[in-house]
């Protein structure tokens, strides 16, 4: 019995356990953590009249709520930002954005023209932390946002005030969303870049499609309409507001909180992760058993 | 080589497994301890199996079912194996190997049986032998016909045509006709000919490169002779990758590239969906489109076979 | 009671003598001889879980409305194959456990075959008289890979359906007959008339398992008839087998191992989610997901397809898509043909036509070991190449960088592996006392100040001890001559 714990089993067993743990940690999505993690740390009031509600979604199969058609309203409301946001927004813009985008937001050789992009576009880039951006030669990544929700809206209001048009900041109500329709639309329009599990993947020329596991509903809607970076622009003629609500509800529920009824999710990157686990943990553990049962000579 | 040892003991069954025989000794230095461990393991196994029975009835959770049954079988297995490894006779026992081959006479006799008996008979009746051989061959050949040919239809020219033809309206996968205002610049949409939404060979990807009006010059694509195949800044290509047929659904609107998600072939849209990287060999065939009364239509079908290469493709 | 049963059987079938031979069969105990058992017991688990699944799965592409528990699918039109597979995962008690255990068992089955095959290769167990068993084994590997592909394609989900599309294109790429074969198999232009799912099903549950099962019987039968090989050691010669008898020792260990294999597969099946088809959705030929690869045992083919340059031969009114045909058909065919022919190739190269019952230590055949290691590295690199996009994302480099890196290392790393392995083998052979415990050196100084060292005596128990070759206790005292025979009966020596 003691031989089980002697050195010759200890090393392969430790190797197996550590590789296995590493694999499980690396491949598991962080989706079990809060879905809206990328929203800025709140600083006080939410501003006048702004409501965002996270959509309800059925947590377990067979739960009482069922997807229903929206009776009226498509869940996306473009509320214009209060005029009181413009002045603080201008100050923030001058201090943080003007050095690259120009004092008039019309762009310089370092950064593009922001006029007519709309408040929603700006809010997406700022609230996900992509802006301010240190190095514009590579694709901007999500990082801890420098500005909180309110400040992001203020900057957006200022830029919107400079020129009309563009994507508005949406208020998203997911309560009447149809996640079934959302799943179909997601598969047709989004999965080819973001993967069917929303894990994200590399694109051509050094670009990449980011993971969807941390985006808030508002950011999802803003991204769909504004098409940041290499993402296509999906206008209302392509994906209507109701359809966008359905996609957002699906992402917010089944993408960010997938039903992993079978155990650890293994990262959602496809069968290559499963092969890794099957060979190292499955065959590996059984080989350890062989070491124990059999002789070494 | 003798096979069994001849013992000097009297006739009658020997006592089996005499504990004094050094080769019947167990492996464990403390058999009592080993037995205890095996016993505990078997008890855990029993509890695990009973636990599975309970978990099956009261919970719908895969994880509870797995942990109970898994621990149960692990316990039973470990206990049995430990019994075998530590408590049963370990030997070493020896078995003799006999040469695999038979004696020379046997081999000669076997060969002779076939050649002489068989050879004589067939040699006398060469006609019958030949006819039967030919018959078997004939049967073998025709037996393949139902096995293979009945499976499905011949390709004919099915690989060369799609349902797209002149004036086919473009519709979405829901069957909705596509209007010229539907896509913004940088937009992408999967389209089909009307009545065939969802049909695999007809799948087409529609891109809006620029927002052009009827008075503007058309999109400049670098492939010659195709300036009138676009309409109002819209361009349409077959969505079926020319490598292995995966849908080329990934559109990068800033670099104006289509990427196939399967093996990462990159197609340059403005150059006529020419593959610039990856294993795809040919550009995506382009569908000529036009706008009539605000809606998009095809000017005709594809001018070549879509999708991956095959022998009959010229 | 045992006596009566034995008599009952023996009176009818004459099992006593042959049966005892079987019970007395000696199995050597080295741990690496158990790798094939992992495969065998994984196959048993596959059959057991597979029977369960086959009672629920409906092999039809006919569309129905999904009414099960998974909400995003409810009310949508899906194929019966997909609907029943999702139903197994959510609405059948212990269905998901069985489904996942089945899939993990397939992955481990093929993984253990690969490890077992490597053991056979590196120890030279494929040499005469065991070439036939090697051929049977390679055939099982091939059929296992195909059956695995067919199996995970049955649920008709987005990820596996993409694989079916690729398989169709590969078939289509065969010169002269490709388009015909594709149309025949699928019942028309892709996706065909829906017959492909039922055809995959019957191949997967009946035709291939029966063939594999039969081959397993042949494989084990040959093993019993020819007796197992063994490593050289004290008391072990080309003319004996040293180990433990089938009954009771080996039977106990191997049955226990079967339980433990099942347990590991069940634990994987319950805790490591595999192939969550409900997240993928029903397959539609115009939809696709990114980050899709085939299951690991097909990964080497997908990797080959990805790194292959886009050469396509066009001439005289015909096309041969070499970027498909070469990696997927020619290379795959060469691979298996090479595996099949290896015993013959080695015989030609080493001119060694003798029978071998003793195994080589891998280090004693450095060229074979180095070559095998290089081949393993080659196929492993191709397997890694099947996830180029995931790697580009993980390491934050461009797709182009990853692809070109793989194009280089798929050839460079095996070459390096060959030389490194060769060197290691030779060093291991050349080193004195390698693998044994170090002995202390007694240092003494002479009167003139010179140092000298002397090795101490080996520790008790470190030296190899003689193995007394004791035959398995026999319980027949009569010599062969004393056995009675009747007229016209030929006595066969055991």
Image (cartoon, grey):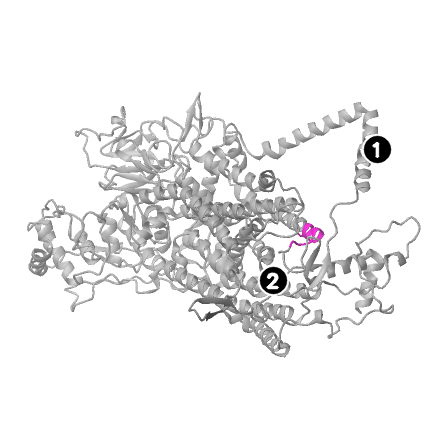
Magenta part mainly helix, strand or loop? helix
Q: B242 and A52: which one is in front?
A: B242
The chain letter under disc 1 is B
Name the quadrant of the N terminus of chain B: bottom right
Q: Which mark is residue C412?
A: none
Image quadrant assignment for residue B291: top left
Image quadrant assignment for residue C45: bottom right
Q: Which mark is residue B117?
A: 1
Q: Residues within 10 Å of mark 2 (few under 14, many from 20)?
A: many
Q: Is residue B252 magenta?
A: no
At x 60% / y 62%, what residue is drawn? C258
Q: A242 and B90: which one is in front?
A: B90
At x 50% / y 47%, what residue is drawn? C370
The residue stretch that appears in magenta: C220-229
Image quadrant assignment for residue C256: bottom right
Q: Is residue C226 magenta?
A: yes
Same chain under badges 2 and 1? The reply is no
- 3D distance between C-alphas at marks 2 and 1: 49 Å
Name the quadrant of the C terminus of chain B: top left
């Amino acid at each position: 019995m003691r031989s089980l714990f002697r050195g010759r089993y200890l090393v392969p067993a430790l190797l197996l356990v550590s590789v296995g743990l590493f694999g499980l940690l690396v491949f598991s999505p962080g989706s079990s953590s809060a879905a809206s993690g990328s929203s800025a740390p709140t600083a006080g009031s939410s501003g006048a009249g702004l409501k965002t509600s996270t959509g309800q979604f059925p947590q377990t199969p067979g739960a009482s709520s069922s997807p229903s058609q929206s009776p009226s309203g498509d869940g996306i409301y473009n509320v214009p930002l209060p005029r009181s946001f413009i002045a603080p927004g201008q100050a923030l813009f001058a201090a943080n954005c003007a050095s690259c985008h120009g004092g008039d937001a019309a762009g310089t050789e370092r950064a593009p023209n922001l006029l007519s992009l709309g408040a929603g576009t700006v809010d997406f880039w700022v609230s996900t932390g992509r802006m301010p951006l240190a190095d514009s030669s590579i694709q901007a990544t999500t990082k801890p946002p420098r500005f909180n929700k309110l400040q992001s809206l203020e900057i957006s209001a200022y830029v919107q005030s400079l020129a009309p048009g563009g994507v508005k900041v949406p208020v998203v109500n997911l309560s009447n969303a149809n996640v079934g329709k959302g799943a179909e639309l997601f598969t047709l329009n989004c999965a080819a870049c973001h993967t069917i599990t929303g894990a994200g993947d590399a694109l051509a020329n050094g670009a990449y499609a980011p993971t969807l596991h941390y985006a808030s509903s508002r950011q999802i809607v803003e991204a769909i309409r504004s098409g940041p970076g290499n993402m296509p622009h999906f206008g209302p003629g392509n994906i209507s507001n109701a359809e966008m609500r359905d996609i957002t509800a699906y992402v917010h529920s089944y993408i960010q909180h997938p039903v992993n009824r079978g155990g650890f999710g293994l990262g959602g990157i496809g069968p290559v992760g499963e092969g890794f686990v099957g060979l190292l943990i499955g065959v590996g553990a059984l080989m350890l058993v062989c070491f124990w049962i059999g002789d070494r000579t | 080589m003798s096979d069994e040892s001849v013992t000097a003991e009297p006739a009658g069954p020997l006592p089996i497994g005499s504990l004094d025989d050094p080769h019947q000794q167990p492996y464990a230095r403390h058999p009592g301890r080993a037995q205890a461990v095996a016993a505990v393991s078997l008890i855990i196994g029993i509890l695990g199996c009973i636990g599975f029975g309970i978990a099956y009835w009261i919970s719908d959770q895969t994880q509870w079912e797995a942990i109970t049954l898994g621990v149960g079988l692990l316990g039973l297995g470990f206990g049995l194996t430990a019994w075998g490894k530590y408590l049963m006779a370990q030997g070493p026992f020896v078995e003799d190997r006999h040469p695999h081959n038979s004696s020379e006479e046997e081999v000669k006799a076997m060969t002779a049986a076939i050649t002489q008996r068989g050879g004589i008979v067939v040699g006398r009746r060469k006609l019958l032998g030949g006819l039967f051989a030919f018959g078997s061959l004939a049967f073998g050949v025709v037996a393949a016909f139902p096995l293979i040919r009945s499976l499905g239809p011949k390709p004919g020219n099915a690989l060369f045509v799609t349902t797209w033809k002149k004036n086919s309206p473009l519709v979405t996968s829901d069957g909705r006709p596509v209007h010229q205002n539907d896509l913004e610049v940088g937009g992408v949409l999967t389209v089909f000919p009307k009545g065939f939404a969802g049909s695999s060979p007809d799948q087409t990807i529609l891109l809006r490169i620029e927002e052009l009006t009827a008075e503007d010059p058309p999109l400049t694509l670098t492939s010659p002779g195709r300036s009138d195949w676009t309409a109002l800044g819209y361009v349409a290509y077959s969505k079926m990758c020319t490598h292995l047929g995966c849908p080329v659904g990934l559109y990068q609107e800033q670099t104006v590239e289509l990427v196939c998600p399967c093996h990462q072939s990159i197609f340059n849209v403005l150059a006529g969906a020419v593959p610039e990287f990856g294993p795809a060999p040919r550009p995506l065939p382009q569908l000529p489109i036009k706008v009539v009364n605000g809606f998009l239509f095809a000017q005709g079908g594809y001018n070549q076979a879509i999708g991956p290469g095959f022998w009959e493709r010229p | 009671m045992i006596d009566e049963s034995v008599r009952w059987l023996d009176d009818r079938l004459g099992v006593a003598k042959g049966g005892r031979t079987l019970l007395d069969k000696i199995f050597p105990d080295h741990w690496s001889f158990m790798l094939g058992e992992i495969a065998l017991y994984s196959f048993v688990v596959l059959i057991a879980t597979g029977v369960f699944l086959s009672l629920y799965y409906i092999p039809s592409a006919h569309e129905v409305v999904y009414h099960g528990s998974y909400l995003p699918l409810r009310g949508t039109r899906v194929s019966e194959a997909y609907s029943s597979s999702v139903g197994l995962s959510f609405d059948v008690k212990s269905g998901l456990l069985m489904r996942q255990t089945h899939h993990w068992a397939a992955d481990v089955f093929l993984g253990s075959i690969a490890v077992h095959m490597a053991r056979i290769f590196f120890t030279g167990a494929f040499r005469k008289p065991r070439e036939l068993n090697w051929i049977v084994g390679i055939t099982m590997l091939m059929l296992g890979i195909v059956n695995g592909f067919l199996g995970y394609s049955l649920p008709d989900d987005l990820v596996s359906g993409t694989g079916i599309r690729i398989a169709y294109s590969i078939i289509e790429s065969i010169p002269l007959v490709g388009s015909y074969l594709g149309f025949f198999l699928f019942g028309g232009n892709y996706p065909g008339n829906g017959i492909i799912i039922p055809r995959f099903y019957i191949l997967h549950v009946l035709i291939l398992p029966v063939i594999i099962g039969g081959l397993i019987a042949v494989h084990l039968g040959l093993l019993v008839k020819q007796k197992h090989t063994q490593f050289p050691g004290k008391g072990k010669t080309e003319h004996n087998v040293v180990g433990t008898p089938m009954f009771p020792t080996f039977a106990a260990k191997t049955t226990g191992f079967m339980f433990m294999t099942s347990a590991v597969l069940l634990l994987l099946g319950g805790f490591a989610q595999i192939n969550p088809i409900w997240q993928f959705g029903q397959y539609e030929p115009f939809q696709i997901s990114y980050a899709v690869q085939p299951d690991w045992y097909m990964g080497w083919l997908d990797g080959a397809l990805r790194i292959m340059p886009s050469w396509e031969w066009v001439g005289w009114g015909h096309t041969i898509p070499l970027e498909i045909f070469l990696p997927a058909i020619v290379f795959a065919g060469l691979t298996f043909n090479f595996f099949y022919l290896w015993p013959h190739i080695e015989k030609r190269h080493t001119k060694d036509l003798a029978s071998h019952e003793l195994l080589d230590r891998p280090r004693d055949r450095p060229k074979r070991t180095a070559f095998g290691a290089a081949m393993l590295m080659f196929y492993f690199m191709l397997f890694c190449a099947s996830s180029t996009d995931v790697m580009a994302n993980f390491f934050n480099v461009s797709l182009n960088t990853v692809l070109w890196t793989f194009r280089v290392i798929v050839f460079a790393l095996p070459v390096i592996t060959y030389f490194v392995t060769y060197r290691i083998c030779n060093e291991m052979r050349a080193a004195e006392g390698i693998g044994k415990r170090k002995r202390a050196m007694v240092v003494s100084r002479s009167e003139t100040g010179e140092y000298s060292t002397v090795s101490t005596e080996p520790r008790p128990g470190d030296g190899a001890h003689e193995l007394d070759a004791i035959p398995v206790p026999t319980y027949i005292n009569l010599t062969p001559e004393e056995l009675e025979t009747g007229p016209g009966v030929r006595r066969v020596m055991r």
